[in-house]
Amino acid sequence: MRLLCGWSLALLGSLLILLLSVDPGRAVTRYRNSSPPASSPGVVIDNGTIMLGVNAEGHLNVRDAGPPSSGEGTTDVGLRFLPTGAEAIAPGCLCEGWGVGEMVLGISGTASVDLPGGITNMVLENFAATASTAVSTVNVGGIFRVVHDFHPSPATPLLYEVTVTIENISEVPLLDVKYRRLMDWDIEPTAFAEFVTIDSGTAANLAFVTDNGFDSPDPLSPPQVDGGFSFGDRVDDGPR
């Protein structure tokens, strides 16, 4: 089961903050608006219940970073439920990532392990982590500074939260900014045959959601919904 989310935004020399909460079995997105070297390795963080493998550029799925998972036996760590050792996004391909772009200027950058494009048009400014948190800061094309702050959710130990801050560091207004996030859910113990619910909630600037987690993370690329993929929310969609 796949998930693609895109936000359409205007960034006029200000900051934008997205709050994204994830758990191993359900995709939930919340939105809020408010005014080291590139070779840094990824890290594994956890809150005692949920484990994340976070790469330096802010995308998930760190290769060979943990013990074999309880289902498919992968040693790659993306999103795990520690009580059972079940992995949720690393089985199969490491298809999770993000991208940001300005549609008028035609400038974008992406970060992923296996999704199209990989890491493009961004420079790592800083990556810092503790046992339970990770903060990635990148410069995208000299236009954006993007900070991904991963931390335990204050709401429940069953959630991790990432606060995404997008800053305009250029001298020009950015009138059509888009942020895109994708993931391919393969949730153990039934990886490749899970049921997923997608709920857009009340996010005013959410442009779309699809079930194509193999799409490009580049917001300049139109979403692809051919081959059986589709737009829109869904409830207990699967097994697939």
Image (cartoon, rainbow, N blue to C red):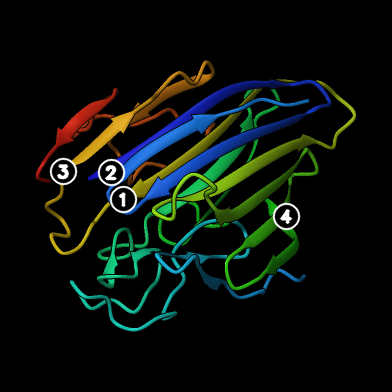
| Image coords of residue 110 (percent x, y) | 57, 48
Depth check, mark 3 against mark 1: the one in front is: 3
Q: Is residue 59 visible?
A: yes
Q: How far apart are the alpha carbons under marks 4 and 2?
A: 26 Å
Which residue does the numbered mark 3 point to in the structure image?
195
Mark 2 crowdedness (10 Å alpha carbons): few <14, some 14-19, many ≥20: many
Which residue does the numbered mark 2 point to in the structure image?
2
Which residue does the numbered mark 1 point to in the structure image?
184
> In terms of sequence position, does the residue under pointer 4 or pointer 2 come before the other?
2
The kind of residue on which mark 3 rests is: Phe
- In the rendered view, does 138 fall on the left or right side of 158? right
Mark 1 crowdedness (10 Å alpha carbons): few <14, some 14-19, many ≥20: many
Q: Is residue 40 above or below residue 91?
A: below
Q: How far apart are the alpha carbons under marks 3 and 1?
A: 12 Å
Q: How far apart are the alpha carbons under marks 1 and 4?
A: 24 Å
Which residue does the numbered mark 4 point to in the structure image?
137
The kind of residue on which mark 4 rests is: Thr
Q: Is residue 109 visible?
A: no
> In terms of sequence position, does the residue under pointer 1 or pointer 2 come before the other?
2
Q: Quadrant of the N terminus?
A: top left
